[in-house]
Image: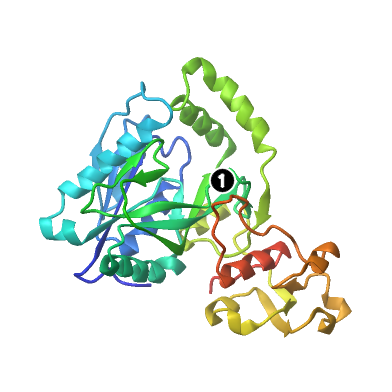
Amino acid sequence: MPQKFSNLVKLYGFGVLKNGVKFDFPFKESVYSMEPICEKVYFALGDSEDATNSEFEKFPFVKTINTTWDKSLKDGKVISVETNKALQFLKSDLSPVDLKNGWGIYLQADEVLHEDDYTVLKKDIEYCEQNGLDAISFRYLHFWHTHHHIAVTKNWYPHEIRIIKLDSQIESWGDGQSFRNQKKVFFTDARIFHYGHVREQSAYEQKMRFQSSFHHADHLVEEKLKKDAENSKKHKTNYYYGTHPLVMKERIIRMNDIWELPVAPTVAIVGNPEKYSAELLKHIAAKEVKWFKKVREVPASMREKMVITEPTIVDYFFKRAVPHLKMRSKHALPWNDDFKLVMQLSSRQIGFRHD
């Protein structure tokens, strides 16, 4: 795990939250996922009806400002307004030198960083600082109702800006999904684990109603919720049995979901192992991983769960490979080889170990 950045670059976290306890947001996990790489984290805390604000007193590395959410704002604009309050709070707390060298990472309270991505983030931010880029867009994993199903329907955004140069005019806008006024964006392979649709059912229903009230007039909320419930049945998902951020372990177990799949006895993979990082391969949850150059080399007893890393049309036709293991959005960028293998193994119910 990397230490904080050098004097050349400093990273600061920021975010917003209201009723995080009531609506069962994984906000503690989100905040803790920022701490290892941030100098400090700043939060604008709304006028909550629960213990959210007192919970933040337990974070010694977080500075907070109390705000009041404007209920008259619709189309989700209150989120961008509150996000910009947090951003300005952060900027006002820095010296001119720290502001000039500073970068800000913004996470919504249901978004979590994976510790495996800290090193690549450090490298990417330093690259952007040295080459005049001012924003970094992350890949997104949108978990749908469980921690092992990723929503991939085309209306789910495949990537979004979450790191910005602080000494700039970049600001949150719209419903707070992204930022504007950036000049040059870098696309990182680091991931945002988005758990907005995975929580206790009663809290989820309350959260969706609350969220809808900031997008629509009061008399339209119930109609919108009913429509969203119908549309949710159409969501396409892919299995994901890669690792989750370690800060999520207690929460996932508490929700009676799977932290790690049982170790498989043997896994057959058709492909070239040299394409993949040694770190990834050693964490495949199998007692034995056997590599083959061609499908015909795989013993018949191992073919049912074999993984073909470069499937052909014939492989799809005979159902030897699972199609569409990617997000359907036309804006989606190709996954790197390591993550493609994670998704391919996940489709065969093969997982990964943390240790």
Q: Position of residue 170 (x, y in %)?
A: 28, 47
Farthest-out residue, right: 300
Badge 1 crowding class, 10 Å Cα cut-off, few under 14, some 14 to 19, many 20 or more, is some
Q: Is residue 88 visible?
A: yes
In percent of the image, x 54 and y 79: which residue is there?
Answer: 277
**Three-letter amino acid code at disc 1?**
Trp
Would you place residue 333 above or below residue 152 in this image? below
Please state which of residues 195 and 121 is positioned toward the viewer in this rendering.
121
- Name the image quarter holding residue 176: top left
- Residue denoted by label 1: 156
In x, y percent, where is residue 71? 36, 23
In the figure, residue 324 lies in which quadrant?
bottom right
Q: Residue furthest front?
A: 183
Residue 337 versus residue 119: which sits nearer the camera? 337
Q: Quadrant of residue 77?
A: top left
Where is residue 145? Give x, y as percent. 62, 45
State the count of labels: 1
297, above or below 149, in the image: below
Q: From the image, which quarter does the N terminus lie in?
A: bottom left
Mark 1 secondary-structure assignment: loop
Q: Position of residue 206 (x, y in %)?
A: 52, 30
Residue drawn at the location 68% of the way across and 47% of the way down: 236
Kindly identify the residue that appears in the image at 68 percent across and 68 percent down.
345
Residue 261 appears in the rendering? no
Question: Closer to the camera, 174 or 192?
Answer: 174
**Would residue 112 be found to the left or right of residue 129 on screen?**
right
Residue ID at (88%, 78%)? 300
Foreground pick, 73 / 209: 73
Q: Is residue 276 above or below residue 153?
A: below
